[in-house]
Amino acid sequence: MDKQGFTTGIVHGDRKTGTEHGGVHQPIHASVQYGFDRVEDLIGVFQGTKKGGFNYARQGTPTTAALERKITSLEEGVGTVCFSTGMAAITATFLTLLRAGDHLVSSRYVFGNTNSLFGTLRTLGVEVTTVDACSAEEVKSAIRPNTRMVFVETIANPGTQIPDLHNIGNVCRGHGIAYVVDNTITSPALFKPKAIGASLVINSLTKTIAGHGTALGGAVTDTGLFDWSAYPNIAAEYRRSMAQEQGLLQIRKKGLRDMGAALSSEQAHAISVGAETLALRVKQCSENALTLAHFLEGHAAICRVLYPGLKSHPQYGIAQELFKGASWLLSFELTNAECMIEVVNALELPIKATGLGDTRTLIIPVASTIFFDRRRDPQSHGDFRRYAAAVGRHRGH
Ligand SMILES: *Cc1c(COP(=O)(O)O)cnc(C)c1O
């Protein structure tokens, strides 16, 4: 499909659907309201019979729609819904596709805020089991008759664990379970989760895809592989659409229109521009991170470096097989954890800040920040007590 080349596809994609006045870039549509000469057209937009129309910016604008097309094409999916943040995209996916009494199986190694969201789901009656998803067997044995969804991150933030992506895909297919893959750290430049049978792909656009640290956004893409007509939680009003469209339609209507975490046109535009250099940045950042990982691995004060590009990484083989690069996220552990403050303060270039996917290199001690809330959770202790996670993300020279 991608005969044109990844970057060529992104930079010329906008013009395929036409731009006003022959603009080389998509414009920023600031309008909240969209008016029509004939009321039939307004009705058609509401009822979904007039495809591609807009009525109110909370449900999308021509600018957010252009970004959605871009992400759909990058992930080789059938459609995308954009949100104001990555967390909004994840929340909307869970809240619209899961109901009280349902069961979600997730990798134990996920972004801290996603893990915190599982706590909220539990208060709403959704059962959540977290497992070591580096083993597909563990995922399989956690499945129950009411399991509706399996959730994993391609490379876990911040521990860099990689689930047994391919075999979990087979397990989900065998059980008719929706397979939701957070592709934030890898991005479609390194990996397209459709290849391992993902049903829905989440991207925090804030991170790798925008890449400049000046815009927030999130996206859910449907790969077209899942049969939503067999999924019990689709509301009757969305059953009228084609089976392939039902899941995303429910996410757009219930998760975006009703819950309201809409992406603004200005942010969508900033993300779109960032996405144009995605492949170039990711390649350079992966090279930089590997150099840094080798350096840290040889350093006497460091007892463990977690980077999927290192042969010592437990899932090095999977990274080599599935990803075009090992990404820009790495973690390391000091031999003497007591020195953490001193070591981090002594660094000159990396900025002590939370967040990922900036043009700048950032560093954060995760145990005392992101995982601070989880310090009483015995399961997380072994993994996160001593990590300092660094993001190897320099601008290429
Ligand atoms: C940051 C992050 C998110 C959330 O994205 P925001 O845009 O910050 O809301 C989700 N998943 C992963 C893996 C992340 O690193």
Image (spheres, rainbow, N blue to C red):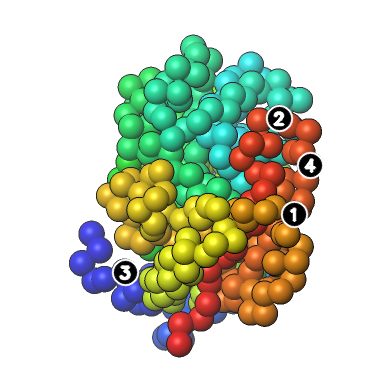
Mark 4 to mark 3 CA distance (whole Å): 40 Å
Look at 33% across and 22% down and name the residue there: 174
Which element is circle 1 on? helix
Read off the residue under disc 1: 338
Label 1 neighbour load within 10 Å: few <14, some 14-19, many 20+: few
Residue at position x 39%, y 23% in the image = 137
Q: Nearer the viewer, residue 37 or 93?
A: 93
* Mark 3 / mark 2, whichever is N-terminal: 3
Residue matched to label 4: 373
Closer to viewer: mark 3 or mark 2: 2
Assign a secondary structure to mark 3.
helix
Q: State the residue in front, 208 or 314.
A: 314
Query: Is residue 103 left or right of 288 when viewed as pictured?
Result: right
Image height check: is 101 above or below 158? Answer: above
First in residue order: circle 4 vs circle 3: 3
Residue 369 pos. (x, y %): 76, 53
Q: CA distance from mark 2 to mark 4?
A: 12 Å
**Residue carrying label 3:** 6
Q: Amino acid at mark 3?
A: Phe
| Real-space Cα separation, disc 3 to disc 1, in angstroms | 45 Å
Write the residue at 51% across / 24% down.
Answer: 148
Mark 2 lies within 8 Å of ligand 1 (Cβ measured): no
Image point 76% across, 25% down: which residue? 123
